[in-house]
Image: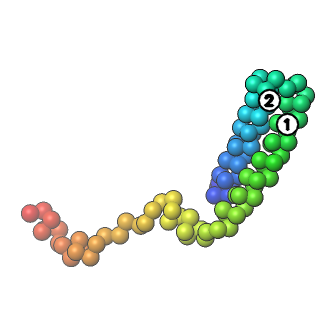
Amino acid sequence: MIKRSHYANAWSNIVAILMFFLTFFTAYFISKYPLISAFIRAIVTLLVSTVIAKALVFVWNNSMSPDEWRLIVKGAPDLPKRADLLITEEEVAE
């Protein structure tokens, strides 16, 4: 079963990889750096963004309990109101 931490780690890896490509292409095509220099800049950006994203995921995963997480994701449980419980089926059919 995939847990909340797996989703968060996957998204942090996706963000880090996107930062790599963004840095590489902007350094190479827009700033006109040499290929090796642009690649090294992108690798440094990948490492830094991975460390920062993992730290944020760690803090986020430990900031709330599983019950609070479930309440945020799924919302409050749908409980019947007391007045609805007192109505009989015959009254509803009328």
Looking at the picture, how far across and down is residue 72, in whole percent? 51, 62
* Residue 23 in sight from this viewpoint: yes
Where the C terminus falls, by quadrant?
bottom left
Residue at the spot 67% in from the left edge and 63% down from the top edge: 61
Which quadrant holds residue 25?
Answer: top right
**Residue 27 circle label:** 2
Q: Residues within 10 Å of mark 2 (few under 14, many from 20)?
A: some
Q: Residues within 10 Å of mark 1 (few under 14, many from 20)?
A: some
Which quadrant holds residue 93?
Answer: bottom left
Looking at the picture, how far across and down is residue 18, in whole percent? 71, 38
- Residue positioned most to the right: 36
Residue at the spot 70% in from the left edge and 58% down from the top edge: 57
Taking depth in this image into account, of 85 and 62 the one nearest to the observer is 62
Helix, strand or loop under label 1: helix
Taking depth in this image into account, of 66 and 52 the one nearest to the observer is 52
**Residue 7 circle label:** none
Q: Is residue 72 above or below residue 82?
A: above
> Is 15 left, or right, of 75 in this rendering?
right
Looking at the picture, how far across and down is residue 70, in whole percent? 53, 64
Residue designated by label 1: 41
- Residue positioned most to the left: 94
Taking depth in this image into account, of 58 and 89 the one nearest to the observer is 58
The amino acid pointed to by label 1 is Arg
Q: Is residue 4 above or below residue 38?
A: below
Residue at the spot 61% in from the left edge and 70% down from the top edge: 65
Discs 1, 2 touching: Cβ within 8 Å? yes
